Image (cartoon, rainbow, N blue to C red):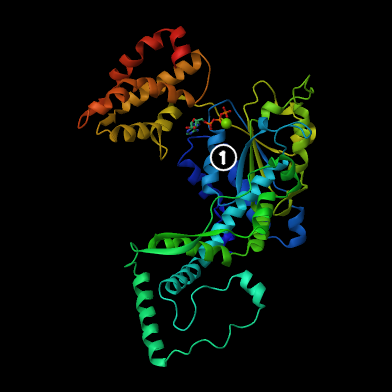
């Protein structure tokens, strides 16, 4: 298995921070904490077995106002991590017994994700063999070997005839014919391989794509039992196929796919996925502050404390049943985030507080941060707009002083109305470019330079009136 060779933990803390720096401006302490936590898991794996079991992951709680990069760090980490990572919002979960998702679903999602990852990786390993096998069956379809009948014996025939070798009374083909037939097949094989016949049509058996069973059972209850009826039924019912005319290129792909399915050992995939989750899984729980508070809910409202109590076992380490097998959550890394302005981390139940020993506060973003956020990240906002308008043939350039002015406007509005962090940049940019966005389609071949004055004149009326900025920006 090669999964371990590509895991994010193998990056040093320095490398992880450098990778995050490409997308997230500032917030160095949070980046460091995340990097250390990841590297510690790598260190743990180097320890002898008995010691290893004792080392628990150091879960992280990121605290800070809205729009300053908490979710962004997790999102970028997910891109970076080849470790299975899921991102959930605490508010989406309900206490067991209420209708809604229960927290075990987090682990089930994580495993499903790992299964896809492992499957892809293993598929890559056998893809060459699958392609070769597909080519061979295509040769057999287009030029059946001489002296043998084309159709493979289907299970039904085997059932009727018993598993005996094919009757020996096959007509003998003269050796000379067989040699020319083989030469023909070799020639066909070569032309197929070189893609010379890709556009020709061929008739093959393709699996029927539509599942005959409708989703009768809503997944909720069964999902909890870790049973997947769809899969079970799918495997019990005979695979339905139909004959279909497709191009040779398509046929290669279809056949390679089914060869691939046959070569993949799904039991091994499941086992490996469970292992990867247990040792390398990461769960990001957003909006944790929204379930903080110890009062229990009134009326139909779900108790926040109840959700915290449900979260506790998976964070502390327990075994969750999934359809791929039981999963121990003891070494999964949890990263939680929340604004915590209406509540405090101390409003969480003590057991849960204790499970997030590393607290990092993220810094509010300054005007200078805004300037950098607008321009530095790989797909910075300014770059995005420039590229969008370029598709219309309109070339837009931003002067540095214009960028400063935009950042200034954003922080001004944040101070005056509500601080929504970098999200303010989106509303400001949208308003600023409203006119160009509207008429860009008629401006092919033109160039516009966005200057400080342009920014001022576009935003002036709104910035001058607090009332207006409240609504528009
Ligand atoms: N430090 C940053 N560097 C680069 N971009 C940022 C930064 N902070 C925020 N952004 C931009 O602002 C948007 C919102 O940020 P993000 O989703 O990380 O907010 P958050 O901190 O999770 O807030 P909330 O508490 O509301 O969930 C992001 O999509 C990103 O484009
Ligand atoms: Mg967020």
Image quarter where the N terminus lies is: bottom right
Rendered location of residue 134, percent (x, y): 47, 68
Rendered location of residue 60, percent (x, y): 66, 39
Residue 237's quadrant in the figure?
A: bottom right
In the structure shown, which secondary structural element does the residue marked by tag 1 occupy? helix
Image quarter where the C terminus lies is: top left
The number of numbered discs placed on residues in the rendered structure image is 1
Residue at 48% of width from left, 75% of height from top?
150
Residue 330 appearing in the image: no
Q: Is residue 1 above or below residue 409?
A: below
* Residue 17 located left or right of residue 270: left
* Residue 24 located left or right of residue 103: left
Residue at 50% of width from left, 42% of height from top?
20
Rendered location of residue 105, percent (x, y): 69, 42
Considering every residue shown, the one lying at the far bottom of the view is: 175
Residue at mark 1: 74
**Of 81 and 168, which appears nearest the observer?**
168
Q: Residues within 10 Å of mark 1 (few under 14, many from 20)?
A: many
Q: Is residue 39 above or below residue 368?
A: below
Rendered location of residue 62, percent (x, y): 62, 34
* Residue 24 located left or right of residue 320: left
The residue carrying mark 1 has its beta carbon less than 8 Å from ligand 1? yes
> Within the displayed image, which quadrant is ligand 2 positioned in?
top right
Residue 434 appearing in the image: yes
**Of 392 and 341, which appears nearest the observer?**
392
Q: Is residue 410 above or below residue 267?
A: above
Residue at 60% of width from left, 46% of height from top?
85
**Of 452 and 206, which appears nearest the observer?**
206
Considering every residue shown, the one lying at the far left of the view is: 445
């Amino acid at each position: 298995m090669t999964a371990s060779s590509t895991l994010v933990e193998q990056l040093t803390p320095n490398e992880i921070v450098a990778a995050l720096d490409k997308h997230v401006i500032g917030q160095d302490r949070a980046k460091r904490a995340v990097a250390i936590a990841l590297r510690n898991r790598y260190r743990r794996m180097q320890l002898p077995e008995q010691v290893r079991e004792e080392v628990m992951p150091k879960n992280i709680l990121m605290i800070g106002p809205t729009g300053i990069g908490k979710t962004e760090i997790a999102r970028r980490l997910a891109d970076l991590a080849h470790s299975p990572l899921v991102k959930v919002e605490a508010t989406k979960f309900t206490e067991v017994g209420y209708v809604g998702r229960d927290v075990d679903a987090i682990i089930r999602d994580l495993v499903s994700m790992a299964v896809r990852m492992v499957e892809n990786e293993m598929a890559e390993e056998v893809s060459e063999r699958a392609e070769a096998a597909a080519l061979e069956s295509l040769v057999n379809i287009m030029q059946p070997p001489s002296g043998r009948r084309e159709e493979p014996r289907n299970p039904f025939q085997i059932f009727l005839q018993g598993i005996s070798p094919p009757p020996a009374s096959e007509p003998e083909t003269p050796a000379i014919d067989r040699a020319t037939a083989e030469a023909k097949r070799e020639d066909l094989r070569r032309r197929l391989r070189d893609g010379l016949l890709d556009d020709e049509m061929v008739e093959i058996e393709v699996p029927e794509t539509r599942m005959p069973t409708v989703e009768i059972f809503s997944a909720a209850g069964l999902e909890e039992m870790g049973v997947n009826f769809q899969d079970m039924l799918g495997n019990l019912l005979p695979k339905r196929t139909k004959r279909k005319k497709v191009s040779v290129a398509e046929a290669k792909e279809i056949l390679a796919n089914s060869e691939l399915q046959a070569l993949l050992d799904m039991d091994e995939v499941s086992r490996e996925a469970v292992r990867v989750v247990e040792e390398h899984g990461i769960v990001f729980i957003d909006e944790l502050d929204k379930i903080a508070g110890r009062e229990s809910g009134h009326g139909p409202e779900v108790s926040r404390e109840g959700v915290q109590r449900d979260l506790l076992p998976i964070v502390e380490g327990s075994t969750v049943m999934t359809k791929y097998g039981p999963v121990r959550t003891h070494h999964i890394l949890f990263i939680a985030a929340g604004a915590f302005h209406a509540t405090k981390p101390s409003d969480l139940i003590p057991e849960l507080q204790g499970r997030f020993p590393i607290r990092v506060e993220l810094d509010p973003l300054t005007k200078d941060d805004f300037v950098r956020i607008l321009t530095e990240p790989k797909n910075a906002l300014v770059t995005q707009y420039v590229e969008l308008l370029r598709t219309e043939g309109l070339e837009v350039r931003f002067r540095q002083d214009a960028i400063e002015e935009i950042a200034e406007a954003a922080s001004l509005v944040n101070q005056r109305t509500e601080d929504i962090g970098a999200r303010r940049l989106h509303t400001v940019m949208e308003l600023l470019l409203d006119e160009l966005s509207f008429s860009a389609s008629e401006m092919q071949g033109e160039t516009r330079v966005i200057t400080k004055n342009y920014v001022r004149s576009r935003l002036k009326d709104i910035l001058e009136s607090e009332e207006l900025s409240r609504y528009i920006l």
